[in-house]
Amino acid sequence: MRDEGGRVVLCGQVKTAAEKDLAGALARDAAGGPVDNALEVRL
């Protein structure tokens, strides 16, 4: 996760689309606002 000018951006790799969705939801809750979910699904 990184901060780009006040925006939270998730970056990295996950194994499933469900993991990507969960990480995005958790990050939004923690940040208290919008999050750009740039995680890549890689098997």
Image (cartoon, rainbow, N blue to C red):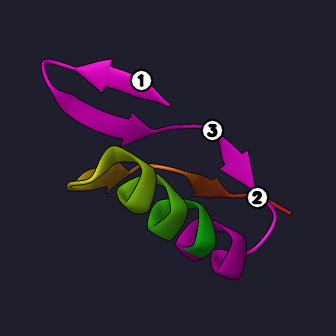
Quadrant of the drawing holding the C terminus: bottom right
Give the spatial CA distance, label 3 vs label 2: 10 Å
Mark 2 surroundings within 10 Å by alpha-carbon count, few (fewer than 14), some (14 through 19), many (20 or more): few
* Badge 3 amino acid: Gly
Question: Between 36 and 34, which is closer to the camera in this rendering?
Answer: 34
Q: Which residues are magenta?
A: 1-21
Q: In percent of the image, x 54 and y 51: which residue is there?
A: 39
- Disc 2 is placed on an element classified as loop
Q: Quadrant of residue 28?
A: bottom left
For the point 47% across and 69% down, the residue is 25
Q: Which residue is mark 3?
A: 12
Q: Nearer the viewer, mark 2 or mark 1?
A: 1
Q: Is residue 35 above or below residue 29?
A: above
The residue identified by callout 2 is 42
Of badges 3 and 1, nearer the viewer stands 1
Q: Image height check: is 31 above or below 23?
A: above
Name the residue at the bottom extreme.
Answer: 18
